[in-house]
Image (cartoon, rainbow, N blue to C red):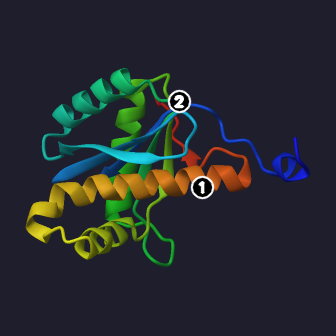
């Protein structure tokens, strides 16, 4: 093992799912067990929240992730508004439904904007691209979470406690 490899914190092995929660749609992405490549999974309709939770539980059962990462929308200054409160509640309910799989909240500032710009640059029309944007945002959230863990050696963001 080289000195460079010893200095690099280890990334926990295992697949992860990332969720970008929106009012109308929920983007879902996953990565390979080595945490190298994040890819889109699907867009779950978000208006029927109980149905969305059921579908996310099915995806967790199917993908068997070591954790689910949920994007937490913060303001550019880092504060939390009504959207963040809503996502925290959603993540709490998700954590209850998929326990013992942990749920972690990670900062998702600018992910939807970045996803939109990337898709527009690749020629995807905004009307057609809405559901794809949510998946792309989930991919970006997951990539950022993986990078954060690679750099710090710690699980990304903050854990969601399962309240009884």
Please state the horizontal and vertical placement of residue 112, each as a whole percent of the image.
32, 66
41, above or below 74, in the image: above
- Label 1 secondary element: helix
Q: Nearer the viewer, mark 2 or mark 1?
A: 1
At 58% across and 37% down in the image, what residue appears? 34
Q: Is residue 23 something that shows in the picture?
A: no
82 sits to left or right of 132? right
At 51% across and 72% down in the image, what residue appears? 78
15 sits to left or right of 55? right
- Identify the residue position indicated by label 1 in the image: 147
Please state the horizontal and vertical placement of residue 36, each as a whole percent of the image.
54, 45
Specify few, some or many for label 1: CA neighbours under 10 Å numbering under 14, 14-19, or 20 or more: some
At 85% across and 53% down in the image, what residue appears? 4
**What is the residue that sits farthest to the right in this orientation?**
3
For the C terminus, the image quarter is: top left
User: Which one is in front, 121 or 110?
Assistant: 121
Q: Is residue 146 something that shows in the picture?
A: yes
Please state the horizontal and vertical placement of residue 71, each as a whole percent of the image.
42, 54
Mark 2 or mark 1: name the one nearer the start of the chain. 2
Residue 72 falls in which quadrant of the image?
bottom left
At 72% across and 53% down in the image, what residue appears? 152
- Identify the residue position indicated by label 2 in the image: 66
34 sits to left or right of 29? right
76, above or below 85, in the image: below
- Label 2 secondary element: loop
User: Which one is in front, 70 or 89?
Assistant: 70
User: Which one is in front, 52 or 115?
Assistant: 115
10, above or below 111, in the image: above
User: Which one is in front, 121 or 41?
Assistant: 121
106 sits to left or right of 9? left
Residue 116 falls in which quadrant of the image?
bottom left
Q: CA distance from mark 2 to mark 1?
A: 16 Å
């Amino acid at each position: 093992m080289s000195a460079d490899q010893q200095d690099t914190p280890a990334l926990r092995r295992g697949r992860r799912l990332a969720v970008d929660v929106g009012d109308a749609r929920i983007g879902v992405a996953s990565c390979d067990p080595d945490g190298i490549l994040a890819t889109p999974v699907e867009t779950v309709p978000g208006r029927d929240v109980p149905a969305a939770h059921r579908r996310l539980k099915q995806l967790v059962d199917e993908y068997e992730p070591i954790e689910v990462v949920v994007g937490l929308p913060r303001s550019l200054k880092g504060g939390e508004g009504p959207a963040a409160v809503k996502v925290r509640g959603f993540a709490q309910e998700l954590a209850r439904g998929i326990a013992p799989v942990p749920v972690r909240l990670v900062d998702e500032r600018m992910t939807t904007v970045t996803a939109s710009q990337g898709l527009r640059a690749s020629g995807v029309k905004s009307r057609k691209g809405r559901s794809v944007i949510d998946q792309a945002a989930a991919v970006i959230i997951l990539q950022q979470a993986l990078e954060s863990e690679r750099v710090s050696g710690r699980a990304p963001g903050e854990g969601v406690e399962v309240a009884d």
